[in-house]
Amino acid sequence: MPISPPAPYRPPFYYFGNAHLQTVVPSLFRQVRGPAYVRERLPTPDGDFLDLDWAKRGSNRLLIVTHGLEGSADRHYVKGLIAALHPHGWDGLGWNCRSCSGELNRLPRFYHHGDTPDLALVVDHALAQGYQTVVLAGFSLGGSLTLKYLGERGAAVPAQVKKGLAVSVPCRLAECGAELSKPSKMFYTRRFLKKLNAKIRAKAAQMPHHLSLEPLASIRIFEDFDNAYTAPLHGFASAHDYYERASSIHYLAGVRVPTLLISALNDPFLTPGCFPVEVAQAHPYLHLEMPAQGGHVGFEQAGSPRTYVEDRLVRWVADLGA
């Protein structure tokens, strides 16, 4: 597909074109009044659980949204996306990765960028409810999961899954980790690691024989955390092994349903390698949009309560009918 030119998009003037403001202000302050959630606890085959937050209106069309690192279904971008489609006759499902629903999960593990078996479990569970049209959407880490799920399954993706949307995706994890290790961006890393380290402490208290707190004292960047915890807890040999096997860039070629990838060129988390221009140009299913501004999972619009991504989703799925 040719690279899709983004629709006209104008951030609020008070961001002054600053990528950090476009990223941080919505994350901290944006509020979305969406349809009320009803929570369901879905058991996993390994004895754990996933908490699913449903916004139903009796439709046979469903939007499934996956949140980003240390997010949840309550994040503004998840609720905003569900709220954007709800008036158009869509049910919504925001699912919470393990440990992200407000209750610590049961096993000596958490979640990660490559954890597509959990997404597959959610999709299969939703299809068992009788949905005929499903769209998968994900932000940042959730976008990684969405792209990897669609790409690694290829033509075996359930026929009811008609389209995908991925936003602000760190397609090359090692590069993005290095980018966020730069002094000018370490405040993002420190914020994430503060939350992740707190979960490690809670998990160590829950099952002290499985985790040691000793590495926490030397963790400064994502690679430190992933070497100490993400890799060994989830079956990877090292952080490098995890980054290689989980990076969604390696799975794009396998995508076989129309999928829209939106990433802002000023996204402070991403590197040039996260904009797969050459792949998209030769790909019949991957559509790439690169607005000049928007930050990371920001995309607030001047004069509108909805983001550019929310309005773009409405147009993206308009051909799927009622």
Image (cartoon, grey):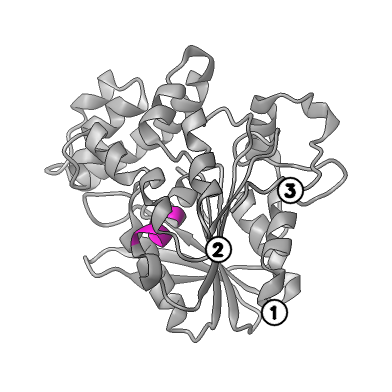
Residue 191 image offset from top left, x and y in percent: 48, 29
**Comparing labels 3 and 2, the label whose residue is closer to the camera:** 2
Circle number at residue 308 = 3
Q: Is residue 243 left or right of residue 182?
A: left
**Comparing labels 2 and 1, the label whose residue is closer to the camera:** 2
Q: For numbered disc 2, what is the local secondary structure?
A: loop
254 inside magenta stretch? no
Circle number at residue 321 = 1
Residue 45 image offset from top left, x and y in percent: 24, 70
* x 28%, y 25%: residue: 224
Q: For numbered disc 3, what is the local secondary structure?
A: helix
**Comparing labels 1 and 3, the label whose residue is closer to the camera:** 1
For marks 2 and 1 on the same chain, the one whose residue lies earlier in the sequence: 2
Proximity of marks 3 and 2: CB atoms separated by less than 8 Å: no
Which amino acid, by three-letter code, is at mark 1? Gly
Disc 3 residue crowd, few under 14, some 14–19, many 20+, Cα 10 Å: many
Q: Circle 2 is placed at which residue position?
A: 258
